Image: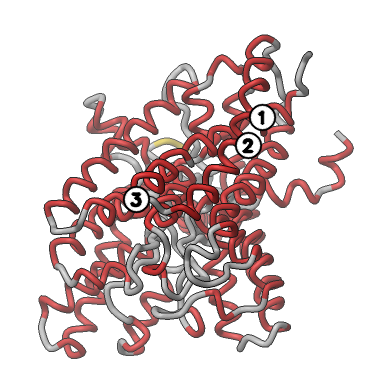
Amino acid sequence: MKTPALPGILIVLLGMVAAVMLIPLALAVILSERPMIGALGIPAGTVIAAALPVLFSLRKNVPRIRSRDGFLLVFLAWVLMSLLGALPFYLSAGAAGSGISFTDAFFESACGFTTTGATTIADVEALPKSLLLWRSMSHWIGGMGIVLLTVALMPLLGVGGFQMIKAEAPVADQERFTPRIADTARILWLTYCILTALLFLLFVLGGMDILDAVCHSLTTMASGGVSVRNNGIASYNSVFIETVSMIFMLLAGLNFNIYHRLAKGQFAEAFDNTEGRAYLLVFFVAATALTISLIPHYGSAGSALRYGAFQTASILSTTGQSAADYTGWPAFSQAVVFCLMFVGGCSASTAGGIKVIRHVALWKQSGSEMRRVLYPRGVFSIHLNKKVGRKDVVYSVTSFVFLYAAVVFLVSLAGSLSGLDVFSAFNAAVAALSNLGTGFGALGPGHNFGQFPDHLKWIYSFAMIAGRLELWTALILLSPDYWRG
């Protein structure tokens, strides 16, 4: 029997997530965490059993999907993955010693797959180790994208891979750097795996135990930032661990196309990447500003550099880790951190946010408009990667920034209506939509989303999913034109 394309592909996607769930399930068996065996085994076994016959059916009857179907497919995939990922949290409530409501479980799962790094759990160290591993793995597979993984490993499905990836992350300068999209996906995932493995080894050398190193390497490379310790990376009080984390947070926020160019020996093309250079420039300028402003606060240049550079990398890459409580810093230092919340990482990276390429495009277009005022008859255009930028890129960027501001405004209103002060409501909206997970006010270091009412957690959960899919994929489904096509 022929399986309908969209439902069939969704079941296979969920089957891949369930297959990953077998790894923490194995850990639960080894550690005899009995409640977790059922919490992980029941959803994993059920979904895998349902996905296998569908997979065989799809391979016999190769499905084809339209480009517009990719938007619905990817959005539903992220929602359903979050629902599936929530089950281990919900079913393991007794294992953690306290109840985890389904709302909190869905929120934790959505945070994982969108790599937001927020949480509702005050005492993460009380969670079973297998659940901590699953929490970290959900960040990791969400970081590069489960759709991208599917295209990498299952090209025989013929599901229109480029349409799916375009729907998942419709960034301004999306580059398809190999003839086959499946090859592109495999290259990106290979790079991701190599960097994660290297980070794991460095964490072990820095003194982390094996599980801590695994979990932190998974979430750091995913730009997720959640920790297995209540105080996060600050728990280790290690300059080496913080420095390694800072470097790999920056690497995770870089455009992964740059690594492919470097691997091929195309050094000129890699160094000419406009977005990459702007990203590093923002880091060095912000880190320098923070370091100088923090010297009086810490009393030494070394400590100021340690915490200033780390927090710059963390916020810029939307990882959201904190090595110090920046809400106690001088006003100027806090202002720098606040401004970084609106930058984000590079396109084709694991980072969230508005993305550097959009800021660059708008900055260059603003310069062109100023020159046009001075020279009305002149012809001006922006240049990206030493190539003339298309006008439609500028239009797309402008539309995205407007939509981003509009959604932040609406989500902020929802928070204010629920009793949050204006600043906390605004910070929560930005933290969710930018997949940052931290901020100021009620969301500064040491605080989490657990204090908010359930209906707000659902709003923030879908804001995180919309932000992870760069808004277009989620919002286009609200357009009547989409459903008429």
Residue visible at 17% across and 90% down in the picture: 296
- Please give the residue where the numbered disc 1 appears in the rendered image: 50
Q: Are marks 2 and 1 in contact (CB under 8 Å)?
A: yes
Left/right of residue 473 with respect to residue 327 in the rendered view: right
Numbered label attached to residue 46? 2
Mark sitting earlier along the chain (3/1): 3
How crowded pointer 1 is (Cα within 10 Å; few <14, some 14-19, many 20+) is rated as some
Quadrant location, the N terminus: top right
Of 407 and 381, nearer the camera is 407
Above/below status of 411 relative to 23: below
Residue visible at 32% across and 34% down in the picture: 191
Mark sitting earlier along the chain (3/2): 3
Residue visible at 37% across and 56% down in the picture: 129
Which of the 4 image quarters holds residue 292?
A: bottom left
How crowded pointer 2 is (Cα within 10 Å; few <14, some 14-19, many 20+) is rated as few
Numbered label attached to residue 31? 3
Residue 310 picture location, percent across and down:
25, 67
Quadrant location, the C terminus: top right
Above/below status of 464 relative to 299: above
Of 40 and 465, nearer the camera is 40
**Callout 2 secondary element:** helix
- In this view, the mark in front (3 or 2): 3
Q: Are marks 3 and 1 in contact (CB under 8 Å)?
A: no
**Callout 1 secondary element:** helix
Residue 431 picture location, percent across and down:
52, 68
Q: Kindly report the distance in space between the C-alpha atoms of the residues bearing marks 3 and 1.
A: 28 Å
Amino acid type of the residue tagged 3 in the rendering: Leu
Residue visible at 33% across and 53% down in the picture: 215
Residue 188 picture location, percent across and down:
39, 32
**Callout 3 secondary element:** loop
Of 3 and 290, nearer the camera is 3
Which of the 4 image quarters holds residue 447?
A: bottom left
